[in-house]
Image (tube, rainbow, N blue to C red):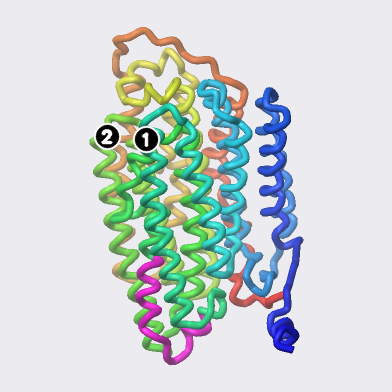
Amino acid sequence: MNTILLMDLIKPDPNIAAVLPEMIVAIAGILAMLYDSFVPKQRYVTGAISLIGLAISAIFLYSMWGDLPETSWNGMVANDNLRMSFSFVALFVSAMTILVSSVWIDREKVPVGEYHALLMFATFGMMFMASGNDLVIMFLGLETLSIATYVMAGLRKGDLKSNESAMKYFILGSFASAFLLYGMALIYGATGATNITEIAAKVASPNFPALLLVGGAMLIVGFGFKVATVPFHVWTPDVYEGAPSPVTAFMMAGPKAAAFASFVRIFVLGFPLVASVPAAVFLHESWITALTVMAILTMTLGNIAAIVQNNVKRMLAYSSIAHAGYTLVGFIGAGMAKTPEARDAAIASVAFYMLTYAVTNLGAMAIVTLLGQKNDRRTEFEDYNGIGFKSPVLAFSLSLFMLSLLGLPLTAGFMGKVLVFRPALEAGNLMLAVLVVVAVVNTAISAYYYLRLIVVMFFRERTTDWTAPKIPFAIGAALVIAIAGVFYFGIFSNGVIEKFSKSAPIQSAQVK
């Protein structure tokens, strides 16, 4: 009798179509692993299987992109603009990583089946973080992503730096996951719900326990680690430098975007501003203030620390910290938006910024991977001395990516910064206006270390013999895609932004 009552209370909602894009990616990972087990000598096939899986997943995902937001699986999986845009970023990052990895796989004799399977499972986790409308789904996606990434960081088993990178990432990442899970447990204890829509309804009620504030603070700690914001950034430079360059490229763009997707959904949609409820106003102002302080510290420390780096990978690691701070500006703007339309546009700007950062950074890391040789030995600034006219294609491409990261007009980085800063200005809040000013000043500071690499390539004399490497087809394809993306998103960004913000927020959806 009790079983019958329970089944009536919680009816299963197995909508396979709603999670088909994620399932396709997972199946591609399983197929890559199985193929490598039975036909280990065909090293390029697992990469092709993975790319085909990502392409099919993208097609199904695009076909689901509609005007009406929906939820399925008892409200646990969302189908809205936030899910679609960040899932496309995840698929793009993974596809580019496969292309960038090709030369590294041959050079390091990496077990390709394991590598591509891990990459697919990490992508599966990223997509569930974006689609999760429930704290449980988000955490499952996060752990799937994290475990796969821990292993990828240590795939170069004979390299002590890679081993140290993987161990440090695993230990600190486990602590961050514990904070995140405990925060989720406290939120459940305070609201009696793990569903984001139900949490938002509880927050809008006249009274809710102060436990929610503590839970929110612990979520900020956990997500702060995942997106590498100050003061939770200390792992980033060492892990990014020690990990293989293609894995570093993936970690800089993919997990960061996925973490921001969950971060935005919980705080912007789950902790809304309800002016008639003083407790909700206090909660909203608390996390806005905390993230504003974190954004200022993250941008400033990231850029200042990047100035003194002599290793290109460490410089880009600190650069990624600064870019997390820029992304927080758009995040905070979404939280302070005055209308649902403004909030949707702000969320879309965060997704677009993650896309432009991914395009630019993956292009730069493709060149770093190609020039780094075995075990990433040649990643110091002095290793780039005088290569500008010895390998003009690589040097000019890397210069373009540095200028895009800086935010030069007509590049993707410029439009990304404009769009992510605009919501904060439109909020009409003095604190956010100061935040944008700080962001602009930090952008000017970043010019030093981005232009420094260009100066080193074109205006420093090389003291050792150096032969320009041949550009493999996969790396060339990645560079063509990245260069086209830098110009396309810098000049024709309107269509992408409109697509990213097309659907309404999921809170207006009906559970199916």
- Residue type indicated by callout 1: Glu
Give the farthest residue toward the top. 465
The image quadrant of residue 68 is bottom right
The kind of residue on which mark 2 rests is Gln
* Label placed on residue 352: none
Residue furthest front in the image: 1
In the displayed structure, 349 sits above or below 481; it is below
The quadrant where residue 381 appears: top left
Residue with the mark numbered 1: 241
Q: Nearer the viewer, residue 80 or 370?
A: 370
> Residue 479: where, in percent of width, then height?
55, 30
In the image, what residue occupies the spot 25% across and 42% down? 305
Q: Secondary structure at mark 2?
A: loop
The kind of secondary structure element at disc 1 is helix
Percent position of residue 156, x then y: 47, 30
Q: Quadrant of the C terminus?
A: bottom right
- Left or right of residue 430: residue 148: right
Identify whether 419 is placed above or below 154: below
Quadrant containing the N terminus in the rendered view:
bottom right
Compare marks 2 and 1 and give the one earlier in the sequence. Answer: 1
The magenta region covers 200-219
x then y, percent, for residue 179 = 39, 64
- Label 1 neighbourhood size at 10 Å, few (<14), some (14-19), many (20+)? many
Q: Is residue 58 visible?
A: no
Q: Which mark is residue 309?
A: 2
Crowding at dot 2, Cα within 10 Å, few <14 / some 14-19 / many 20+, comes out as some
Kindly identify the residue that appears in the image at 52 percent across and 52 percent down.
Answer: 352
Decide whether the magenta segment is chiefly helix, strand or loop.
helix
Cα gap from disc 2 to disc 1, whole angstroms: 12 Å
Rendering quarter of residue 465: top left
